[in-house]
Image: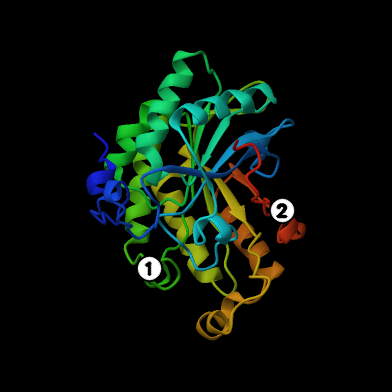
């Protein structure tokens, strides 16, 4: 059973605030449903985006709030437009009509009491597309289990091996153990990946790991931990797309100087080689051109109203 907004504990932070009375927890999300963009997205993994695009719905605010987030405008700034559950259901069908291969829910956890009824309604009305749960990996096992009947594809991050990095960059020292347990619940719910004849993913788990500047050793430990735990039950997605803030504040430059540069291409290649040496074969990799702000979606309310 999911918690509701009057005592919010949807994510591991379990703030316990009453969002129905205007109280705001860590994520700063209100009780009302807010989304920033609903459109076809062509830059997910190939088995998610395919040739037509993934039907992405970007939800405003975030339960993790990483300091390096490329979508700061919505995750930290909270940009978005308030809509109803009924409108969200309509959006699912509009994306389907545009040719979306799937419905991709991006950072949805803090709005699940709205999203689940919308999904129920959409499925009742005939929506057949796979549902993707695209999240930062910082999830409660109970929440994963509660929503698993509605989700076909899980797309979590596994950001850090070291708790100190979770504390420094996401104010979540428990991130590694929490995310690992959540991913295990996702694997148990979805099983091994199923790829259709068209090359599109129908069900399963893809775990993303973003290499951060100067953090190659931590990334290697994270990848090794995942492979030791899950083997070929997950598909890996090793990402080199870290993009420094365009105009970092003096405070950011002072506190996180290591994040003011791009990833060293040699370090990324070393991570890819390390994964191959471990025996990982189900893995997506990126080229040098992926670390470009041009790949960051524009958040202007496209497709929302």
Upstream in the sequence, badge 2 or badge 1?
Answer: 1
* Residue 46 in sight here: yes
Q: Describe the colour scheme in one phrase.
A: rainbow
Q: Is residue 188 visible?
A: no
For the image, the number of numbered tags is 2
Point out the image quarter for the C terminus. top right
Point 71% across, 53% down: residue: 295
Residue at the (38%, 70%) spot, across then down: 167
Asked whether, in this view, residue 260 is left or right of residue 220, the answer is right
Tell me if label 2 and label 1 are in contact, CB under 8 Å: no
Q: Is residue 144 left or right of residue 70?
A: left
Give the percent coordinates (x, y) of residue 286. Answer: 69, 53
Name the spot of residue 130 as percent of width and height, x first: 53, 26
Q: Could you tell me residue 18's position as x and y percent?
A: 25, 50
Q: Report the disc number at residue 228.
A: none
Q: CA distance from mark 2 to mark 1?
A: 26 Å
Depth order, front residue of 167/73:
73
Q: Which residue is mark 2?
A: 295
Above or below, 67 against 150 in this view is: below
Q: Nearer the viewer, residue 111 or 252?
A: 111
Q: Residues within 10 Å of mark 1 (few under 14, many from 20)?
A: some
Q: Nearer the viewer, residue 146 or 216?
A: 146
Considering the numbered disc 2 on the image, is that residue within a helix, a strand or a loop? helix
Instruction: Name the quadrant of the N terminus.
Output: top left
Counting other residues with Cα less than 10 Å from the Cα at mark 2, is it few (<14), some (14-19), or many (20 or more)? some
Q: Which residue is mark 1?
A: 171
User: Residue 100: x percent and y percent?
Assistant: 65, 28
Q: Residue sitting at 65 percent across and 37 percent down?
A: 39
- Give SS at disc 1: loop
């Amino acid at each position: 059973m999911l918690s509701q907004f009057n005592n919010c504990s949807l994510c591991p932070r379990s703030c316990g605030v009453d969002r129905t009375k205007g109280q705001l927890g860590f994520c700063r999300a209100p009780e009302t449903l807010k989304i920033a963009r609903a459109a076809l997205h062509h830059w997910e993994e190939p088995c998610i985006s395919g040739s037509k695009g993934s039907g992405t719905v970007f939800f405003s605010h975030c339960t993790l709030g990483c300091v390096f987030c490329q979508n700061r405008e919505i995750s930290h700034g909270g940009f978005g437009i308030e809509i109803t559950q009924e409108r969200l259901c309509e959006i699912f069908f509009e994306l389907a009509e545009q040719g979306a291969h799937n419905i991709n829910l991006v950072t949805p956890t803090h709005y699940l009491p709205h999203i689940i009824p919308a999904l129920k309604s959409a499925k009742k009305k005939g929506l057949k597309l796979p549902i993707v749960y695209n999240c930062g990996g910082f999830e409660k096992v109970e929440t994963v289990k509660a929503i698993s009947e509605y989700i076909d594809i899980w797309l979590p991050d596994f950001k850090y091996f070291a708790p100190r990095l979770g504390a420094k960059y996401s104010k979540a020292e428990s991130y590694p153990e929490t995310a690992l347990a959540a991913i295990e619940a996702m694997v148990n719910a979805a099983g091994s990946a199923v790829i259709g004849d068209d090359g599109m993913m129908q069900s399963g788990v893809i775990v993303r790991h973003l290499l951060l500047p100067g953090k190659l050793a931590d990334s290697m430990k994270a990848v090794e931990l995942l492979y030791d735990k899950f083997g070929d039950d997950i598909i890996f997605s090793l990402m080199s797309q870290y993009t420094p803030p365009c105009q970092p504040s003096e405070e950011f430059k002072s506190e996180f100087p290591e994040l003011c540069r791009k990833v060293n291409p040699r370090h990324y290649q070393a991570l890819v080689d390390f994964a191959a040496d471990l025996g990982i074969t189900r893995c997506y990799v990126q080229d040098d051109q992926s670390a470009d702000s041009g790949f960051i979606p524009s958040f202007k309310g496209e497709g929302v109203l």
